Amino acid sequence: MGKSAGISPASASYHATILRNAGLISSRRVGVAVLHQLTELGRELIGRQPAVV
């Protein structure tokens, strides 16, 4: 993860925590991976249409 994004895993985790605390993403652990997804607020702020559920 860190190499392809050009940042360390610790830095990516820190930034994900900031986004999660702001309500812009949600995160869930799947095995050893953590999956991040935009929340409705996150989608609104970047101008995307809501996901169809």
Image (cartoon, rainbow, N blue to C red):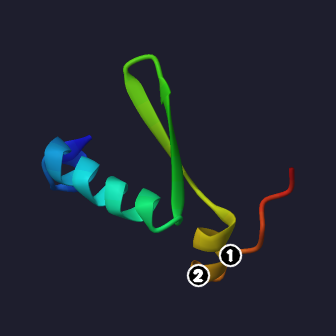
Are circles 2 and 1 on residues that touch, CB within 8 Å?
no
Q: Residue furthest top?
A: 31
Q: Residue at x 68, y 75 (%)?
A: 48
Circle 1 packing at 10 Å, graded few (<14), some (14-19), many (20+), is: few
The numbered mark at residue 48 is 1
On screen, residue 48 versus residue 11, left or right, reads right
Q: CA distance from mark 2 to mark 1?
A: 8 Å
Position of 53 relative to 19 (above/below): above
Position of 34 relative to 24 (above/below): above
Q: 7 and 29: which one is in front? A: 29
Q: Quadrant of the N terminus?
A: top left
Q: Secondary structure at mark 1?
A: loop
On screen, residue 11 versus residue 42, left or right, reads left
Q: Residue at x 58, y 70 (%)?
A: 42
Q: Secondary structure at mark 2?
A: helix
Task: Estimate the x, y position of residue 27 in percent, counting from the top left.
Answer: 50, 43
